[in-house]
């Protein structure tokens, strides 16, 4: 019995995007099927048979990129700029400059490092170049990318296949790229009809031996009738057979290239709105947001950190700046943040108690509120993040009591309901030092947004000959380098080689961006404990540049602290708003002195900014004081201290 069902359809399924049309009601042409999961009828015939029945099939693909484009257009409309994306010029110089520079992060179809490399070599100057690149950048055809680029840029002569068909290949630099070109060549050289040429293309693409055996003599006969030699006709047929196997549909490539161009045009002309729209589409993908945030910084666009008094639930644009969306934080839902923004309305929250009074914190949830605190989104209400985090349960309980009182029938006749409830006492604790603050921020945002743990070490690392990732990449553009680089470990993936030796790929970051280092077994065994997420390390590396990506091979790994200490200290300038901070400053120095070596001592200058003073008053303290990163962090957290910098 099993043999009797062999070859029969196991189940009914529907093409994800295939839509068919006919010149009359479909039930007069093909049998239909009612798909219980859809309101649209489906044909019982598959793709092959519906076309033979006289229907035409279209693939309507849903692309997230279309949402990005619509989002950017809507953001532009909010500031009074109307853009009809279907009518933008297809010869915009700024757009092709962007393509040629390969700064195509978030540009549809050309985001990968391979595509970026191809763009640098091609230097597109017209939309046809983008269409060709979309078609060529696939296994098989991509071997022709170097040839296309060299011919286009005058580094190589265009090859002639035959005068009858050379004009067909003019736009693709003499290379067969599209299926339509295969069909045109069959028409021009061998006299095929359009329908016959399409059958030839299908036979070649699917490598149907019987059909190929019939088509070859037919092609050669038609070519002979047009004065082409039999040898040349056979050569062209073999060439067509090779390219038809992976030739791309030009109309498909053109549709993708047009969407790519539209995103490139938006990025080249309206980068702020475009990047905000891109980030909204990937609002829950932290890794992508990190890439986009670095691109925003590269473009010179200011990214305003999350703030409950300014931010919206999504990324938004204000006066040429991108306001970080509250809903982009980890474990924070967009809908909950919309509720928070609705409660804010047009009136900013005055303080943390006003916030708890107007927003029903229990409905927001403890975990989202914790992420808001750790990300600094409540800094405008209370800058001491540790105090807010340790007071969160008390604030949620008070907020609930206020809202229950407001909803009860026992509200005061002469006062606002709940207004007489005493405000809870907040925890009396010092805020986290800068490095710990940034660690909490990283946990909430997914990457470092307002600073980096290595910022405090930057001057000392520079004295120790440590390069930033950006500077090392610039040097590697001139050739391979042996250098020293510092970073904070983001992740480590260990692998085992064919010989059984363990090695690791380590992702790190510094204030200029992310990078990856390969660590082989001997170095890994010595430094495994240092290569834990959150640790700061200094690596001696061999560095090369592939495309725009640094390739690093670690030869030595050390903790960042001893390297900073060995570089010695320069000094410290403390910007204070009042001299009342001096007793607390003295206490910090006394505590730090016990744990600070003589190498980490230096001069300290106080810069006083106060009402009634013209400009600043600078006072240099007598003696040498602890100026280690730990001491700077402790001083920076003191009330009355504006900022601290190394001198």
Image: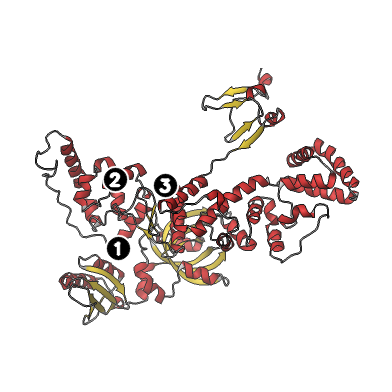
- Circle 1 residue: 434
Secondary structure beneath dot 3 equals loop
Q: Which marked residue is nearer to the observer: mark 3 or mark 2?
A: 2
Disc 3 crowd rating (10 Å Cα; few below 14, some 14-19, many 20+) is: some
Q: Is residue 440 left or right of residue 611?
A: right
Q: Give the Cα separation between the discs numbered 3 and 2.
A: 18 Å
Q: Hey, which quadrant is residue 403 in on the image?
A: top left
Q: Position of residue 428 (x, y in %)?
A: 17, 56
- Circle 3 residue: 284
Q: Earlier in the sequence, mark 3 or mark 2?
A: 3
Q: Give the Cα separation between the discs numbered 2 and 1.
A: 28 Å
Q: Say if 625 sits above or below 557 in the image.
A: below
- Circle 2 residue: 340
Q: Nearer the viewer, residue 490 or 50?
A: 50
Q: Give the Cα separation between the discs numbered 3 and 1.
A: 26 Å
Q: Hey, which quadrant is residue 464 in on the image?
A: bottom left
């Amino acid at each position: 019995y099993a043999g009797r069902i062999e070859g029969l359809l196991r189940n009914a399924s529907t093409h994800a995007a295939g839509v068919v049309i006919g010149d009359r009601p479909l039930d007069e042409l093909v049998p239909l099927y009612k798909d219980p999961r859809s309101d649209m009828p489906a044909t019982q015939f598959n793709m092959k048979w519906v076309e033979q029945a006289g229907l035409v099939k279209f693939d309507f693909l849903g692309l997230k990129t279309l949402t990005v484009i619509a989002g950017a257009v809507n953001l532009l409309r909010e500031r009074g700029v109307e853009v009809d994306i279907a009518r933008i010029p297809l010869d915009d110089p700024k757009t092709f400059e962007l393509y040629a520079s390969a700064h195509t992060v978030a540009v549809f179809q050309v985001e990968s490092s391979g595509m970026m490399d191809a763009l640098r070599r091609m230097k597109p100057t017209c939309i046809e170049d983008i269409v060709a690149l979309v078609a060529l950048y696939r296994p098989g055809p991509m071997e022709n990318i170097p040839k296309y680029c060299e011919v286009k840029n005058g580094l190589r002569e265009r090859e002639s296949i035959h005068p009858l068909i050379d004009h067909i290949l003019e736009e693709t630099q003499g290379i067969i790229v599209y299926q339509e070109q295969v069909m045109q060549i069959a028409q021009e050289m061998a006299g095929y009809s359009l329908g016959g040429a399409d059958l030839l293309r299908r036979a070649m693409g699917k490598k149907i031996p019987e059909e190929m055996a019939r088509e070859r003599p037919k092609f050669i006969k038609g070519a002979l009738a047009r004065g082409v030699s039999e040898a040349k006709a056979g050569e062209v047929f073999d060439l067509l057979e090779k390219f038809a196997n992976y030739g791309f549909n030009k109309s498909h490539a053109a549709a993708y290239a047009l969407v790519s161009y539209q995103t490139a045009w938006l990025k080249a002309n309206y980068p702020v709105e475009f990047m905000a729209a891109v980030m909204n589409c990937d609002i829950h993908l932290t890794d992508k947001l990190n890439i986009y945030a670095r691109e925003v910084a590269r473009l010179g666009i200011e990214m305003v950190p999350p703030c409950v008094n300014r931010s919206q639930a999504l990324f938004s644009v204000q006066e040429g700046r991108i306001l970080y969306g509250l809903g982009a934080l980890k474990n924070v839902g967009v809908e909950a943040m919309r509720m928070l923004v609705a409660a804010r309305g047009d009136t900013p929250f005055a303080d943390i108690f006003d916030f708890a009074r107007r927003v029903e914190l229990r409905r927001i949830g403890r975990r989202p509120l914790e992420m808001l605190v750790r990300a600094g989104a409540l800094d405008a209400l209370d800058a001491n993040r540790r105090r807010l985090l340790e007071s969160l349960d008390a604030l949620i309980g008070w907020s609930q009591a206020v809202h229950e009182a407001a909803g009860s029938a026992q509200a005061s006749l002469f006062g606002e309901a709940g207004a007489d409830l005493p405000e809870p006492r907040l925890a009396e604790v010092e805020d986290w030092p800068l490095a710990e603050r940034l660690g909490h921020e990283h946990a909430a945002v997914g990457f470092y947004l307002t600073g980096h743990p290595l910022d405090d070490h930057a001057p000392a690392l520079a004295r120790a000959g440590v390069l930033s990732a950006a500077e090392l990449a610039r040097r590697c553009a001139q050739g391979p380098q042996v250098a020293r680089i510092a970073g904070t470990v983001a992740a480590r993936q260990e692998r085992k080689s064919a010989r059984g030796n363990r090695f690791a790929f380590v992702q790190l970051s510094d204030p200029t961006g992310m990078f990856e280092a390969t660590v082989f077994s001997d170095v890994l065994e010595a430094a495994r404990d240092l290569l834990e997420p959150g640790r700061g390390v200094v690596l001696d590396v061999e560095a090369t540049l592939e495309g725009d990506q640094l390739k690093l091979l670690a030869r030595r790994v050390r903790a960042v602290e001893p390297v900073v200490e060995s570089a010695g200290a320069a000094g410290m300038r403390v910007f204070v708003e009042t001299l009342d901070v001096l007793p607390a400053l003295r206490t910090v120095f006394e505590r730090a002195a016990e744990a600070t070596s003589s190498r980490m001592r230096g001069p300290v200058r106080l810069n006083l900014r106060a009402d009634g003073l013209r400009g600043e008053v600078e006072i240099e303290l007598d003696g040498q004081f602890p100026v280690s990163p730990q001491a700077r962090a402790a001083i920076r957290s003191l009330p009355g201290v504006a900022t601290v910098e190394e001198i």
